[in-house]
Image (cartoon, helix red, strand yellow):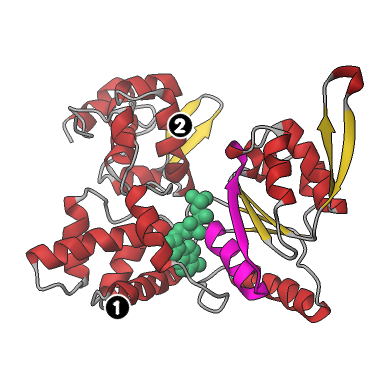
Amino acid sequence: MNWDDTAPPTADAADGRLVGASADGEDQAVEAALRPKSLDEFVGQERVREQLDLVLKAALARGATADHVLLSGAPGLGKTTLSMIIAAEMGAPIRITSGPAIQHAGDLAAILSSLQEGEVLFLDEIHRMSRPAEEMLYMAMEDFRVDVIVGKGPGATAIPLELPPFTLVGATTRAGLLPPPLRDRFGFTAHMEFYEPAELERVVHRSAQLLDVAVDTDGAAEIAGRSRGTPRIANRLLRRVRDYAQVKEDGRVTREIAAAALAVYEVDGRGLDRLDRAVLKALLKLFGGGPVGLSTLAVAVGEERETVEEVAEPFLVREGLLARTPRGRVATPAAWAHLGLVPPRQGSGASGQQGLFGT
Ligand SMILES: Nc1ncnc2c1ncn2[C@@H]1O[C@H](COP(=O)(O)OP(=O)(O)OP(=O)(O)O)[C@@H](O)[C@H]1O
């Protein structure tokens, strides 16, 4: 089904979008090759890099294991990459797991007890760990010890288990969901911001070099401008532009070629895709810019409420195109401008909106 006025997007189509920030199968395969391997190679996030550099160098100078690190920020901004860099800079091995994979305290005890001294344990989506595992982690982080409970009921006994010192790197997209006792046990917390276009240009140039694609300055800027502040999306758009350049052109990527390629994939100059534009168009054309309730807006685009709210809206809000108000969703003047439409005059009523439907 198409994502336009006549054929609204489907929930299935919302998965695996070109501008989605989560990694799909193809991303995972190439991401390993594109990951920066050291803090020097890691583009942007200057403050985080500077602070982390101090934390790691100080630990190395003391011959100690680095403090536990919490990384928060949206998907695709480099949390996994940074955890691998922490291990590499410390000369330590890394073990990677995630909150949803640890449903029982026993799962965590098994991982913790098999760590080597100084090892980095990367725990992605740490906010999704089960409560008993979380409580076990408190003690492990603070005292490098866990109590393994053997047996059930009144006969249950706690057997203390010493752990080697390790560095926990927790990653979360929802720092606010972490219980304070867990948050407080991290010695260093970094919030990762969305990247500036100039930083994403550097990501594109770096990846292009690794993928052996010739991209000029304007071509990189065009891709960066549509990447929604996210390196993972920049890398994905670069790969699609490379396909186009190789099939339709001579393989080199210029601004015109990048724009033509991304037009094929319906990613517009600001990084909106068909779903985003369908939501905006419905809001502007059907509801005069709002306010309109989320459920009504979702029905108008033939989508689930959750898809509109969680997939399309965050970026539209971040871009200043849509506002969530107590009375409903409202389009901003920038939304009208982006779609080339003229907002109705104040107080012009339904007749004032007539013209919009024909636009
Ligand atoms: N600062 C950066 N410089 C260069 N490339 C980067 C940077 N940050 C991320 N990338 C690239 O973006 C891709 C995604 O990064 P990564 O997997 O670390 O994101 P993440 O924040 O862990 O995402 P998720 O939350 O979905 O796991 C990787 O291929 C990596 O190469």
**Rendered image quadrant of residue 211:** bottom left
Q: Earlier in the sequence, mark 1 or mark 2?
A: 1
Circle 2 is placed at which residue position? 309
Q: Amino acid at mark 2?
A: Glu
Amino acid type shown at disc 1: Thr
Q: Is residue 263 magenta?
A: no
**Magenta region:** 79-100
Q: Is residue 280 visible?
A: no
Q: Where residue 290 sits: x, y (%)?
A: 40, 28
Q: Main secondary structure of the magenta part?
A: helix
Residue at mark 1: 217
Q: Is residue 81 above or below residue 266?
A: below
In this view, the residue in front, 269 or 306, is: 306
Mark 1 Cα-neighbour bin, 10 Å: few <14, some 14–19, many ≥20: some
Is residue 25 in view from this perspective? Answer: yes
Let me know if residue 87 is in the magenta part: yes
In the image, 254 versus 88, the foreground residue is 88
- Provide the secondary structure element on which disc 1 rests: helix
- Rounded to the nearest angstrom, the CA distance separating label 1 from label 2 is 35 Å
Q: Position of residue 203 (x, y in %)?
A: 41, 70
- Name the residue rendered at 19%, 29% in the picture: 1
Examine the rendered structure and indicate whether residue 21 appears above or below residue 120.
Answer: above
